[in-house]
Amino acid sequence: MIRETDCPAPCELNTLYGSDALAEMLRRLDMPYVALNPGSSFRGLHDSLVNYLGNQDPHILLCLHEEHAVSIAHGWAKITGKPLAVVLHANVGLMHAAMAIYNAWCDRVPMLILGATGPVDAAKRRPWIDWLHTSRDQAAVVRPYIKWDDQPASLAASLSSLMRAMTITTSAPMAPTYVCFDVTVQESAIDTMPTLPDPARHAAPDAPAASAAQIDALVAMLAEAEAPVFLVGRVSRDGTDWVRRVALAEHFAARVITDIKTGAAFPTRHPLHAGAPGFFLSADAAEVLSGADLVVCFDWVDPAGTLSQSTLRDSARVVNVTLEPLLTNGWSMDHQDVVASDLTILTEPDTLVSALCERLRLDSTTQTPRSSPAPHGQEAEAVLSLDALAHVLRAGMVNDAHTLVRLPLGWDGRHCDFTGPLDYLGYDGGAGISSGPGMVVGAALALKGSGRMPVAVLGDGDFIMGATALWTGTHHQVPMLIVVANNRSYFNDEIHQERVARVRDRPVVNKHIGQAIDEPDIDIAGLARAQGVHGLGPVSTVAEFESALAEALTMVRAGKAVVIDARILRGYVKEMAEGMTAEHQG
């Protein structure tokens, strides 16, 4: 249901403008939404979205910060695999959004980002403000972490660039694109609607496929291997791709390792799954990896760093299946350390898995059953910890189909029970704090009406920075549940300070200074209520959290958005604490 305030009054169109053509092009690109925070540099386009298109297809998602607009599009893409349009105001809006764009780049998600600039012709600029909001090369702010950009100087060039940006962002490997429109092009009158590029004739090309020789070589390597291990990273949210991955692993009895940085990729309770998913290797996963004689990396994030966490034998062979080399640049180090491999296949992992299943004639129809967790087993009056929270949350949601949109850095992967590709969406790519709330809203929009409940466990620092993103979700009446694992600290940095203190023989007791978020305490539930969300808590015991969760789930099932302030003890799972504070290499 669209809010009354979002329904424009009827409009008689006597004159067409350049921005009307740009808006029509967005409709032709099948954009359901456009996320934006208003700005004068695209006032022409904004008018066209409202009065030419009637605020339909695409519908405007008003956001309270540019970073939220990008994070919402990021969450949408993680569910759908498709881009949303984002509009950013001039150089200042682009700078606000830069961190979120970097997250989307690192997470390899598609996104159509549109910018705008004050008149390129200096004679047409308004005093003061137009000069502040005009840049010589606006895209330079984000060029190292977008896939392509342009600043076209005419309407025909703008339409062409818009089409090209869409094709490029949806071509694997995916990443955001950016097109900056001159305000003069937007606001100039046009006689007739120009001929628009045909999206059907500009479809994204298929990604490169493995050659027959590469498939033959990999099949032979898998057949010879006695202890193959699959590192399964960035893969699709498609159910058929999921069962193919299971079938391939079962055929070769390959152990499978997954992580929390990327979305659910393989059933975590499957006998072939090794160790618990984590941001770093668990001890069990490291042991399995150390015994491998063949490691196949399926677009795994940081294969070199992961292999270094094991004692992989020198004779073990490594296969790297990824399109990463096509995006690697010299500015960002998100491509991680270089990995030595005996065979590198430039293709998407699921494309290769499909080809292997076809070649081997594997049955890929078996579905993964969900395990039934026992009662959470936590003492009712115990002070809540992140571990206890996880037990209670899993038990409480056992009867609700749900998607875990995000999990915090301290999460213990042993609580992960993933049986399908939409069970978990992964982290945010660039580990930029404040992305969580916006990504939840974007994912919740994509899941609306699907029967799946969007659920996220966010850290308090992430939530506080991004809380106003929730207003967009409540304005559009999107059901979702956020549990804030509130340890009242930027705790990740506390463990760094603890390590430094121990190395330097200084007081560990001081590690909280400059990290603890208290005195005054922040009202998390109050922040939620200020955005139109139902805020519950604070709760600090197992019994209190269990009660709040039951109440929250009832409200979410009824279509409401809910935030629970869960006060937890400070602490990280062992592998996370050790991985985050390990000594710098070299």
Image: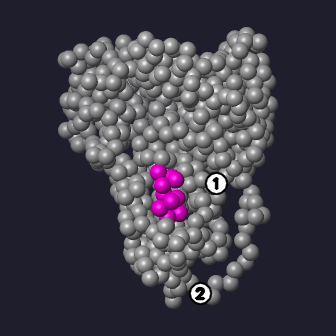
Crowd class of label 2 (few under 14; some 14 to 19; many from 20; radius 10 Å): few
Give the total number of marks visible in the rendering: 2
Query: Residues in magenta?
Result: 89-98
Where 179 falls versus 268 (above or below)?
A: below
- Picture coordinates of residue 287 (x, y %)? 36, 12
Tell me the quadrant of the picture where the C terminus can be found: top left
Q: What's the amino acid at mark 1?
A: Leu
At x 37%, y 27%, the residue is 231
Q: What's the amino acid at mark 2?
A: Thr
Relative depth, front residue between 232 and 487? 487
Relative depth, front residue between 388 and 398? 388
As drawn, the label of residue 64 is 1
Lower position in the chain sequence, tag 1 or tag 2: 2
Residue linked to disc 2:
15
- Picture coordinates of residue 28 (x, y %)? 51, 68
Residue 567 figure quarter: top right
